Image (cartoon, rainbow, N blue to C red):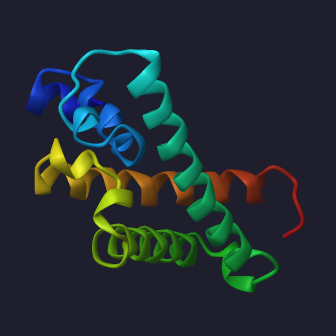
Amino acid sequence: MVCGRRETGSSAAPINAVSHWYWREEALYFRQTDIKHTLLGYLTHHGASVFWGALFAGALHGRPAARNPGAVLAGSMATSAVACFVDFHLTPPRLTPGFEHRLSQRSLAAVYGSFAAGLAVGALLVRGSGSPK
């Protein structure tokens, strides 16, 4: 949202663009916040993030590396990199994230870097919360 606001003048534009799988071209350039584009874009993006997060959590589960912050960070970075590769090289154009139409390459790197950081922080917090180590 921060990158979208800086680059397009609209925090909602990149989120709306995610809904292009359903609303097609219209969603890629819709700038306002609304139920039709923004909610569907958010839910789609959130669902994809949960999917990748679940794969990451499954890969860490029960592994000794889950105790090592460096290994957790490396794993989160690898997960984010794989997600990026799949999103832009293996996914049909109609199902790509969509926000790439609204954000620069630099912002896309920030998005996927933030995703990696979020995965790592989440895994480390769960590990430190008394869950089985």
Q: Residue at x 65, y 59 (%)?
A: 123
- Residue 41 at x, y percent in the picture: 43, 36
Residue 66 at x, y = what percent? 69, 75
Say which of 49 and 33 sits in front.
33
Instruction: Report x, y in % for residue 113.
Output: 33, 58
Q: Quadrant of the N terminus?
A: top left
Residue at left offset 29%, top offset 39% = 17
Residue in view at x 29 percent, y 49 percent: 98
Position of residue 66 relative to residue 103, above or below, is below
In-image side of 55 versus 116 (left or right): right
Q: Is residue 110 left or right of residue 132?
A: left
Work out whether residue 54 or residue 88 is closer to the camera in this orientation and state it.
Answer: 88
43, 63: nearer the viewer: 43
In this figure, what is the number of numbered marks?
Answer: 0
Residue at 42 percent of width and 67 percent of height: 80
In the image, residue 133 lies at what x, y percent? 84, 70
Q: Nearer the viewer, residue 64 or 10?
A: 10
Does 53 sit left or right of 88 as displayed? right
